[in-house]
Image (cartoon, grey):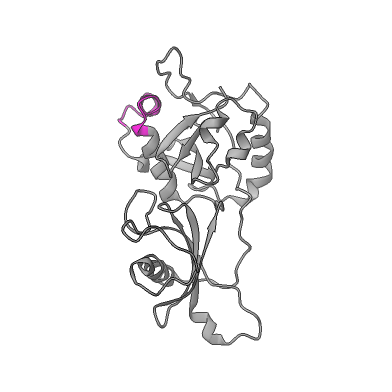
Amino acid sequence: MTDNATDKGAADTRGRRHRRWRVSAALGLTAVLAGGGIAALRTTGSPASDASEPTAVVASHSGRLTSEESREASRIAIDAASRPGTAKDGQKAAKQDDGERNAAGGSGAEPLDTRRPLRAKSASSATDSRAEVRLYDYASDTLITRVIDLRSKKVLDSARQHGVQPPPTLAEAREAVKVILADRRLGPGMRESYASQTGKRLTSPAQLRLQSMSFLGSRAEGVDGARKVSRCGEHRCVQLFVRIPGGKWIDTSRIVIDLSARRAAVIGL
């Protein structure tokens, strides 16, 4: 099991489990809020729910980039927003005074993945110097795809899409944990669950093993609390599946974290 929910082999099982939670009250609640107080997030012996990949999955691209090429392509793609004349998407990005933002609110869009673009069999070998980088701009809630020429260090093409939510990265999953820990209702429960299993304080998302998946508001149709997550899809929202290393799972299956708004909601109560 990987730390980020990209395990293709379990996708079918995960999809079936996800469909069942919408109609089954048997699944464990996450962070039950009783009488305005806090109930600790329940620690269970198995995952509260299995993560499935969202529907917005991009087709495989040919070829692979080296780690060094990926890092360089990401750097060029992120820096492109601060260089006038490099964007070719025909749309306005975030406001010039704000710029693109990552999941933590810092400067520069959030890198999601880097790969070599598809190319026709007849294409020149010169295209092997190209890399395709996908980023998420939290300032404008758009998915950005930039094609980079690694030889010239230039952006060849750039496009933006609204309402497209690829699988979250581990960095985004860790930001989601930070949102939960900062929540006065949910944070104490997660810390208590961790402390009861380890005897230690939970101070960083790096102490947890995480799986995550994108969450769309349409998936909560008919579920209590659906209005609280109605903007998910337009906003970057995730669900977490949290494991204590060497221990049990913390049931967070009913928590939806809106990373764009930096808030968490409990649904399905």
Residue at the top extreme of this rendering: 35
- Quarter in which the C terminus is drawn: top right
Q: Is residue 126 left or right of residue 76?
A: right
Residue 199 belongs to magenta span: yes
Residue at (52, 86) in percent of width and height:
126
Q: Is residue 158 left or right of residue 183?
A: right
Query: How many circles with numbers are drawn on the protein?
Result: 0
Q: Is residue 269 above or below residue 49?
A: above
SS majority, magenta: helix
Q: Taking the image as drawn, is residue 253 in sight?
A: no
| Relative image position of residue 145 (x, y in whole percent) | 51, 65
| Relative image position of residue 105 (x, y in whole percent) | 34, 49
| Relative image position of residue 62 (x, y in whole percent) | 60, 72
Residue at (49, 49) in percent of width and height:
168
| Relative image position of residue 231 (x, y in whole percent) | 53, 40
Query: Residue 194 falls in which quadrant of the image?
Result: top left
Residue at (43, 18) in percent of width and height:
39
Query: Residue 173 falls in which quadrant of the image?
Result: top left
The stretch in magenta equals 181-201
Residue at (32, 26) in percent of width and height:
199
Q: Is residue 186 above or below residue 71?
A: above
Residue 266 belongs to magenta span: no
Q: Is residue 162 above or below residue 259?
A: below
Q: Taking the image as drawn, is residue 179 in sight?
A: yes
- The residue nearer to you, when weighing 200 against 230, is 230
Q: Is residue 53 above or below residue 197?
A: below
